[in-house]
Amino acid sequence: MLMGEYQHTIDAKGRLFMPAKLRDDLGGTFILCKGLDGCLFVYDKDEWHKLEVKLNALPMTNKNARTFARFFFSGAAEMECDKQGRVLLPANLRDFAGLDKNAVIVGVGSRAEIWSAERWQEYNDANADDADAVAAQLADMDIGI
């Protein structure tokens, strides 16, 4: 399970240090793609395959399904860390997530997310007061919160 919050910098070549705990959980190669809320998603190969199966099962005749599949697959890249534990973030994904210097890597259960430090702070500031209301709504879904 991917969890925790880690702050790191992106070097001039676009490389980001991935924490050892996350590297161990993600495996030797992993998938990096555009995420929701302005961040990048990071999946291990098994979780990516599950998402791939679900997206491929959506009807091609549904415009929203095509749009969503394009969003995820078009920017996806198979990645691996170098010997120093760094991953080279593709320029198109850095641009998408507004990543330039300071980044926050967040473990979110089945995936990790990479945020610009500024966007992560803005997200937390905007959503901090909503946690109780969201938990109450999720309790109605009987997920054990």
Image (spheres, rainbow, N blue to C red):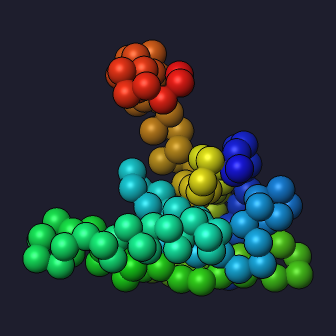
Q: Horizontal placement of 130 versus 120: left or right?
A: left
In depth, the one of 47 and 80 nearer the eye is 47
In depth, the one of 37 and 119 nearer the eye is 37
Q: Residue 42 lies in what quarter of the image?
A: bottom right
Q: Position of residue 68 (x, y in %)?
A: 27, 68
Number of marks in picture:
0
In depth, the one of 131 and 10 nearer the eye is 131
Above or below residue 133? Residue 67 is: below
Above or below residue 16? Residue 80 is: below
Above or below residue 16? Residue 38 is: above
* Residue occupying the point 83% across, 56% down: 21
Q: Residue 29 lies in what quarter of the image?
A: bottom right
* Residue occupying the point 39% across, 56% down: 36
Q: Position of residue 65 (x, y in %)?
A: 21, 69
Whether residue 10 is visible: yes
Above or below residue 102? Residue 77 is: below
* Residue occupying the point 45% across, 67% down: 51
Q: Position of residue 119 (x, y in %)?
A: 48, 47
In depth, the one of 54 and 9 nearer the eye is 54
Q: Horizontal placement of 138 versus 40: left or right?
A: left
* Residue occupying the point 38% across, 67% down: 54
Whether residue 11 is visible: no
